[in-house]
Image: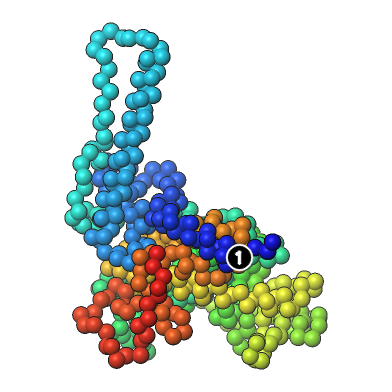
Amino acid sequence: MKLNRSLAISTVIQDCQKENIMGLLEREFPRSIFEQPNEDSKGRNRVFNINNTLLTMVLTSIQQDKTLKNSVSLYYMIHQQTKQRVLEEMEMAITKEKALHKQLGRRKAGRPKNYELQLPKSLDKDISLNTAAYSKARDRVSVKLTQELFKASRIEESENTYSHWRGHRVFIGDGTYVQMQDTEMIKKDYKVKFNGKDSDGYPQGLLVAVTERGTGQIHDFRLSNRHVSELPLFYEMIDELPEKSLLLMDDLYNCYEIISKCLRKNIEFVIPAKRKRDYTHIETIEEGDEIIKIKTPKNRSKWLEENEEPNNLLLRRITCQSPDGKQYVLYTSLLDRKISKYEIQGLYLSRWDIEISIREIKTIMDINILRSRTPEMALKELTVSLATYNLVRKIIYASIKDLPFSPEEDFIYKFYTTNKDLLIDKKGRVYNRWSTGRRGTRAPDKKGDAPKTKTKQKI
């Protein structure tokens, strides 16, 4: 009997949804990152400790209401759950101790032992719903700890066939912009300029990310000013790629320095041509498929590493035709003649997966606009949100990894839209009626072109 893939996947996703996404996230939350001592562990036993504060930040990132007030309400819930769990553990320990004493049948001189439940001071009293203490607790969470959370959220060894191609783990790189709050501290680092002059618009950050095909997870990222080139940021992230990686990139990254470093690190790549490049023909494999040699350019990039020495590079140049009849050129380090140019062209077409991931991150995860009012807090907010996105992806991957499907499909949209009224335009894109993080004082113009259709799906 042939497996109905769509029905099988939908059933698994519905089962996950019934379990409550917050509960699933709390279960996946990597508490191992707290095994190393941190600054907070040296201080007093706080009500808002680092562990629960970071977990609250994770749970807040999947909420449509990301206000401090709602975060404190989530923290209160976590606090109550922790208190109940500790009480149950203490009761179990006392029961075991009583049973052990009864079994031994011994009684020491003096008063009998008083088995009392004594909670830690941090759990003994209910927390206040005032947001000031939680706000300070967020400040105490270090950027380093959020980065450890992000690293721990990744799937290190994916096993589905779509994540690999001929023995290589496939990664996709791209960049996008995120808007930020109009505060003096943010503007100092992320001010937008036009023609060298400061703009009156909101500050913007440049987000460069590498995603893994097959799991949809964010493998690595960098946040910088939008006026910084993507190339040095991406050049730096190449060091974080595992062995036997294969990179799919757009034409922006088609520069000698990126190509040279990939070859030096034994990382395969496929990248389109953005302009005519001088090269020397070496060998023709078949029509539209040839081996070429490119030389080191005379003008090198200013951000180049010292160990990136001049060198002549062997590449494969493939002429392709798009479905609409237009011709384009791909450059690749895959020189194996057993791999046909059509396989490589088909591989590169899956680069579109990252466009889906970026849309999910910015719209569904609601980080198109970061809400934090300082650069450090904005980086922490972004890092926690991307880590949470990875955790959601990990839950989906664990649920359906054995089903025959390609995870480039938009399953996170089906799985994750928790308690949200999503709006969809005529092209099927998700948007918000209000600009996230900057609610206006007036209702939107009803005569505008924006469609008002809401999704019927409400999880």
Residue appearing at x 39%, y 24% in the figure: 96
Q: Is residue 349 above or below residue 130?
A: below
Residue farthest to the front, as pictured:
1
Q: Which residue was labeled with disc 1?
A: 5
The three-letter amino acid code for the residue at tag 1 is Arg
Image quadrant containing the C terminus: bottom left
Question: Does residue 375 appear anywhere in the picture?
Answer: no
Residue appearing at x 36%, y 69% in the figure: 420
Q: Is residue 347 above or below residue 65?
A: below
Few, some or many residues within 10 Å of mark 1 (<14, 14–19, 20+)? few
Left or right relative to 261: residue 424: left
Q: Is residue 299 above or below residue 368?
A: below
- Number of dots carrying numbers: 1
Question: Does residue 23 appear anywhere in the picture?
Answer: yes
Q: Position of residue 172 (x, y in %)?
A: 57, 70
Left or right relative to 376: residue 427: right
Q: Name the quadrant containing residue 135.
A: bottom left
Q: Name the quadrant containing residue 282.
A: bottom right
Q: Position of residue 315 (x, y in %)?
A: 71, 76
Residue appearing at x 68%, y 76% in the figure: 346
Q: Name the quadrant containing residue 36.
A: top left
Q: Tell me the colour scheme of the image.
A: rainbow
Left or right relative to 241: residue 93: left
Q: Is residue 161 above or below residue 351?
A: above
Name the one closer to the observer, 303 or 455.
455
Image quadrant containing the N terminus: bottom right
Residue appearing at x 26%, y 64% in the figure: 67
Name the one closer to the observer, 256 or 22.
22
In what element is the residue under mark 1? helix
